[in-house]
Image (tube, rainbow, N blue to C red):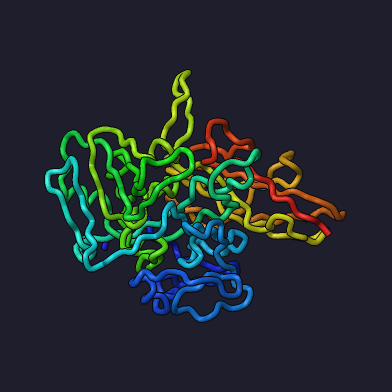
């Protein structure tokens, strides 16, 4: 097995090593393979068909939309490098499809020499790779925008980190044989529906996004059938999803069943009408598809409006990530950005994955309101901006967002 950028072992807050490969594999195997998915809430936590009731106090996914299902990772519960599968955020554009695995095929067509129809067994026989990747919805943090904008009201939890296992996309494209005129690779999911809000879709469409050929051929881009060592869960695209490290989550198409190689730019709905933003190209602002993750840090603790004790030491804790680069530095300010102090990075830089960090804050001696903020800088020298950049619409929310707490 070839391994690309395998995740380091996760540790808890006390530094104890956790075994990702054995995490809850047996109890969820039936659900993952049948596609039954999540049944409902127990003690504030989403549970699966064969789950025991979760222990009291166990954090659970936060419902942002019930149908289609959009569920947020409780970011304030962040502890480990890898997000457990059952807490990994869920982003759906349409209802989850029912997959008949016996008849399921991955079609590869278009500008190729050898069109393919691959079963899951065919893919499982191919050489596999493991790749760590942080996925973030392009609308993560949308609830903090003022004035309010359209879209799912994500707070901070439309982001998670996992180790993915599967077949490199470039191996499948090599098997199909690319024609000289190949320009982009369209990834289409089995999920479909009609967009009834403006801009409306032309009837029922599938969720589909394209990658430029240069990105599609990079070794880290996977057709994943494993997630943190387990079979890919139904909620995350079973039996197959794309994983496009370094790009926003909309590129990592779930329930993948069709790949089309094209010789001209793809102009599908989710490529041109949605998941786009204005970029200044020369002196002509142009609408372009969203792609690379922006440099960003988020504070997991303290949480918004948390009560913290006065004149004490408080561990500020969070995660930071970037796109095609890695995090080099995280800074924290507790005096409204007048002074910044460098935080401790808690793990080695892993390509395409977030880095955990902490900072010891000496809380004020007097009661009252206080603000904590963090900003990240990546190895390419990009620093998280203090203010929202114009032209991004309701996407790519990467500016510094203060966390207000109450000191008592």
Q: Residue furthest left?
A: 113
Quadrant location, the C terminus: bottom right
Residue 180's spot in the image, x, y percent? 16, 35
**Residue 235, picture quadrant:** bottom left
Residue 8 at least partly seen: yes
Residue 225's spot in the image, x, y percent? 32, 62
Quadrant location, the N terminus: bottom left
> In the image shown, does 47 or 93 lie closer to the viewer?
93
- Total tally of numbered discs in the picture: 0
The residue drawn where x is 18% and y is 48% is 174
Position of 97 with respect to 116 (left or right) is right
> In the image shown, does 391 or 162 lie closer to the viewer?
391
Position of 126 with respect to 316 (left or right) is left
The residue drawn where x is 58% and y is 44% is 376
Q: From the viewer's perspective, is residue 78 above or below residue 56?
A: above
Q: Residue furthest bottom?
A: 52
> In the image shown, does 405 or 130 lie closer to the viewer?
405
Residue 308's spot in the image, x, y percent? 77, 60
**Residue 263, picture quadrant:** top left
Q: Residue furthest right?
A: 366
Q: From the viewer's perspective, is residue 239 above or below residue 153?
A: below
Q: Residue furthest top?
A: 283
Residue 82's spot in the image, x, y percent? 48, 62
Position of 334 with respect to 292 (left or right) is right
Q: From the viewer's perspective, is residue 147 above or below residue 120?
A: above
Q: From the viewer's perspective, is residue 408 above or below residue 252?
A: below
**Residue 265, picture quadrant:** top left
């Amino acid at each position: 097995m070839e391994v690309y950028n395998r995740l380091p072992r996760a540790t808890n807050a006390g530094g104890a090593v956790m075994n990702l490969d054995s995490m809850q594999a047996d109890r969820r195997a039936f659900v993952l393979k049948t596609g039954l998915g999540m049944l409902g809430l127990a003690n504030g936590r989403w549970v699966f068909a064969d789950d025991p009731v979760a222990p009291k106090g166990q954090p659970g996914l936060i419902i942002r939309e019930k149908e289609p299902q959009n569920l947020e990772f409780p970011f304030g519960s962040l502890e480990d490098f890898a997000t457990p599968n059952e807490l990994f955020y869920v982003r759906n554009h349409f209802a989850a499809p029912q997959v008949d695995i016996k008849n399921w095929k991955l079609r590869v067509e278009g500008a190729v020499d050898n069109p393919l129809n691959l079963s899951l067994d065919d893919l499982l026989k191919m050489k596999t790779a493991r790749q760590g990747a942080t996925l973030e919805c392009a609308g993560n943090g949308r609830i903090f925008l003022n004035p309010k904008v359209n879209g799912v009201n994500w707070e901070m939890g439309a982001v998670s980190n996992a180790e993915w296992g599967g077949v490199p996309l470039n191996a499948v494209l090599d098997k199909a044989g690319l024609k000289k005129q190949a320009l982009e690779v369209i990834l289409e999911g089995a999920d479909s529906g009609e967009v009834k809000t403006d801009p409306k879709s032309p009837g029922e469409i599938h969720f589909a996004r394209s990658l430029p050929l240069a990105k599609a051929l990079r070794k880290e881009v996977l057709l994943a059938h494993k997630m943190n060592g387990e079979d890919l869960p139904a909620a995350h695209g079973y039996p197959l999803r794309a994983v496009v490290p370094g790009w926003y989550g909309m590129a990592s198409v779930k329930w993948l069943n069709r790949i089309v190689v094209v010789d001209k730019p793809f102009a599908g709905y989710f490529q041109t009408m949605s998941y786009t933003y204005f970029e200044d190209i020369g002196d002509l602002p142009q609408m372009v598809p969203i792609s690379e993750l922006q440099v960003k840090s988020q504070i997991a603790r303290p949480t918004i409006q948390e009560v913290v004790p006065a004149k004490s030491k408080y561990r500020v804790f969070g995660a930071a990530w970037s796109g095609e680069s890695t995090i080099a530095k995280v800074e924290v300010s507790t005096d409204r950005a007048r002074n910044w102090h460098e935080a401790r990075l808690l793990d080695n830089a892993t390509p395409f994955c977030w880095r955990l960090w902490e900072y010891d804050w000496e809380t004020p001696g007097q009661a009252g309101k206080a603000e904590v903020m963090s900003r990240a800088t990546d190895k390419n020298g990009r620093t998280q901006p203090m203010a929202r950049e114009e032209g991004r619409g309701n996407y790519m929310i990467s500016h510094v967002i203060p966390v207000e707490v109450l000191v008592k």
